[in-house]
Image: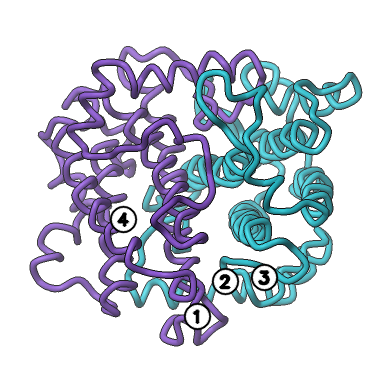
Chain colours: A cyan, B purple
Amino acid sequence: MINTTGNPDRRNFIKTSAALTTGFLGLNGFQSLEAHHISLGDNLFVIGPIEGYSPQIGTLVSMLNYNRQTIIDTVKSLTMEQLDYLHDPSANTIGALILHLGATDKFYQINTFEGRQEFNKAEKKIWEVPMNLGDEGRKKIRGQEVKYYLDMINEVRQKTIEELKKKDDQWLLAIDPEWSKERPLNTYWKWFHVCEHESNHRGQMTWLKSRLPGAKPGKD
Amino acid sequence: MINTTGNPDRRNFIKTSAALTTGFLGLNGFQSLEAHHISLGDNLFVIGPIEGYSPQIGTLVSMLNYNRQTIIDTVKSLTMEQLDYLHDPSANTIGALILHLGATDKFYQINTFEGRQEFNKAEKKIWEVPMNLGDEGRKKIRGQEVKYYLDMINEVRQKTIEELKKKDDQWLLAIDPEWSKERPLNTYWKWFHVCEHESNHRGQMTWLKSRLPGAKPGKD
């Protein structure tokens, strides 16, 4: 897949993006998308304003959608055993990394939509372990099928998109005084970070995936 | 660093972003930034339109700048030996991954600014190996200090920024018919991909960095 390998060789590009397209328009992919309530239509590779959102928010949403689809595409065929695979004692499993994306999304949700700096008790119970990963994560996040992980992160993302729809560019560009004591930092940085953070961990997921027992070596 | 570990715990955030700020405003960091001709000012954590660029292009440039700084920050203290470290026979070295970012930037440059689908002979000589990685990359990309890698990718990036400054949002949003035979794909996707592709490989760099001989185990 071009975004994972980063190889924009024209022939590879056609092949891999066709595979990606087939992946989410084909029967299995389509069912999986339906199951995860993400309706990306045909515009996954079009970044920019989206009808129904303010211009910069629409652009951000198109980025979140694209990146999320690359995550789904990377993990959707993995078995429970593969999701639980621990490459070395300080590694995270792919399952834990998926849930970590949901925790990050959730944190920036409560921060930017509700102005809170910390999870409440109920949120901590669900998200603290995947947020922090490490030993607790290795111990507690396991024994689930991929649908569990994707449903968890999709539920959070649905809320993010709904809330972003209500906001405007002024909100997105606003500096957060609370987070700007060292240097200015704005809401757009927070959500861009949620987005690029998914790419960061996708790089690790593909690395781990190509090293699963029995896997063909990948390019990473 | 928040974007690398993805942990937005408030206290960690302050600590790590302060470290990042010190990192590029402190003497060494500043020299390193000067050496790489990147003048990010104080606005690294402000994503959005930038004076002198059309609104969506400015936003993209702010993203490219932020992501690139996280790469510099991840690798700038590594020795040649660490940049050459091969974790397993199918891994890439961190040095090769840095150069791979430059190759990707260069490819989208010749594609979006010049309408070419392939590197020319001179470009291939420099960029084909880092673009493709694999065995050739493992054999040929080694024995350089970090300054070599950062100078290489910075020279490309400078050109990207100069060219983006001349373009407008209409150019950025335009669908590329040549790449849209399967489904629509626009210029913004191409440059967003260059950007998020750096995060993808940063995830691998931090993973490898925390496994360098003698390194403390990280969170990844």
- Answer yes or no: is residue A38 visible: yes
Q: Place residue A68 in its image quadrant.
A: bottom right
Q: Could you say whether the residue bearing mark 2 is in a helix, strand or loop?
A: loop
Q: Which mark is residue B217?
A: none
Q: Are marks 4 and 3 in contact (CB under 8 Å)?
A: no
Residue at image point 41% right, 12% down: B216
Q: Is residue B173 left or right of residue A11?
A: right
Looking at the image, tell me whether mark 2 or mark 3 is earlier in sequence order.
3
| Chain under callout 2 | A
Give percent across and percent down for residue B162. 27, 58
Q: Which mark is residue B175?
A: 1
| Res. A124 image quadrant | top right
Residue bearing the label numbered 2: A46
Q: Please give the residue where the numbered disc 3 appears in the rendered image.
A: A24
Q: Amino acid at mark 3?
A: Phe
Q: Which residue is mark 4?
A: B161
Disc 2 from disc 3: Cα separation: 16 Å
The chain to which mark 3 is attached is A
Between marks 2 and 1, how big is the CA–CA gap?
8 Å
Same chain under badges 4 and 2? The reply is no
